[in-house]
Image (tube, helix red, strand yellow):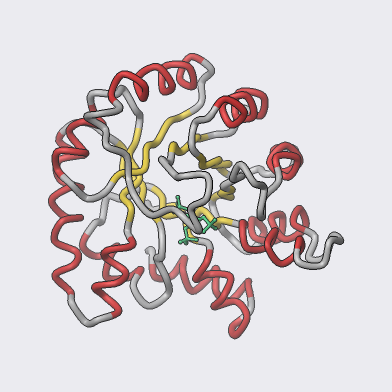
Amino acid sequence: MTKLSVNVNKIATLRNSRGGNVPNLLRVAKDIELFGAQGITVHPRPDERHIRYQDARDLKKLVTTEYNIEGNPIEKFMDLVLEIQPTQVTLVPDAVDAITSNAGWDTIANRTFLREVISTFKQNDIRTSIFVDPDSKMVEGAAETGTDRIELYTESYAKAFAQGNLKGIDPFIKAAQIATQLGLGLNAGHDLSLENIKYFKENIPNVLEVSIGHALICESLYFGLENVINMYLNKLK
Ligand SMILES: CC(=O)[C@@H](O)[C@H](O)COP(=O)(O)O
Ligand SMILES: NCC(=O)COP(=O)(O)O
């Protein structure tokens, strides 16, 4: 079964744009779970441009499905995650000023660092996932870090699919096969959408979790949040 984890960063973006508490992030997250999503994802960035560190703390009290916190494991992020104890932490090598996530880890060059960080989270019973490109060497390097899962960075697939190039899935099929052979759990995310999710799932059937935010919130402007969540759930069956 592939779980849908809804990234609520963009709800926080809209809320922050007026300085108040509308939309109410906590209420939206609760409703997202009531609509059938199997997880909530947040990515509290160092500049807190959308999800604030306090949001991440507050969500812990109400999320009853899986709670996934993504971020670059800088010290204050590590402290936040260890304080909150979410279901899963997803390590992303984002630069502080990155407009969004734009690369996976070099799991070979960062092996020692990742091993230490992952060990710290696993000692605290937090499931670990690391954001990687669909590159066989990076997947093999990920297995050396001791991580529970990898999250395949799906921007290249989404771009190719949008251009009508179905072969964009090929590196992901190979990376998923290697991950499975190495005993890694498989997540995926970034730029997945109602248009491209079904083909991805058909070709990568053993993906455990997809985390989707930007497209899902934009699609909800037209179809409504409850409808969109159920459209994703139907496509992930
Ligand atoms: C790791 C990943 O792909 C998502 O967390 C993405 O970075 C969303 O971040 P923004 O919502 O800030 O674009
Ligand atoms: N890990 C991917 C994520 O949480 C959401 O990415 P996007 O759907 O906002 O591109």
**Residue 4 visible somewhere in the drawing:** no
Q: Where is residue 53 in the image (x, y as percent from the top left)?
A: 70, 40
Q: Which residue lies furthest to the bottom in this view?
A: 222
Q: Residue at x 72, y 55 (%)?
A: 30
Q: Which residue lies furthest to the right in this view?
A: 20
**Residue 50 visible somewhere in the drawing:** yes
Residue 33 lies left or right of residue 164; in this view the side is right
Q: Which residue is drawn at 61% across and 57% down?
A: 9
164 in relation to 41, above or below: below
Q: Which residue is drawn at 55% across and 40% down?
A: 69
Q: Where is residue 150 in the image (x, y as percent from the top left)?
A: 32, 40
User: Between 16 and 152, which is closer to the camera in this rendering?
Assistant: 16
User: Between 15 and 34, which is closer to the camera in this rendering?
Assistant: 15
Q: Position of residue 186 (x, y in %)?
A: 31, 44
47 in relation to 35, above or below: above
Q: Which residue is drawn at 48% across and 74% down?
A: 231
Residue 86 lies left or right of residue 126; in this view the side is right
171 in relation to 120, above or below: below
Q: Position of residue 188 (x, y in %)?
A: 36, 52
Quarter of the image containing the C terminus? bottom left
Residue 80 lies left or right of residue 57; in this view the side is left
**Quadrant position of residue 200:** bottom left
Task: Say how many tags the image has.
Answer: 0
User: Between 173 and 120, which is closer to the camera in this rendering?
Assistant: 120
Q: Which residue lies furthest to the front in this view?
A: 97
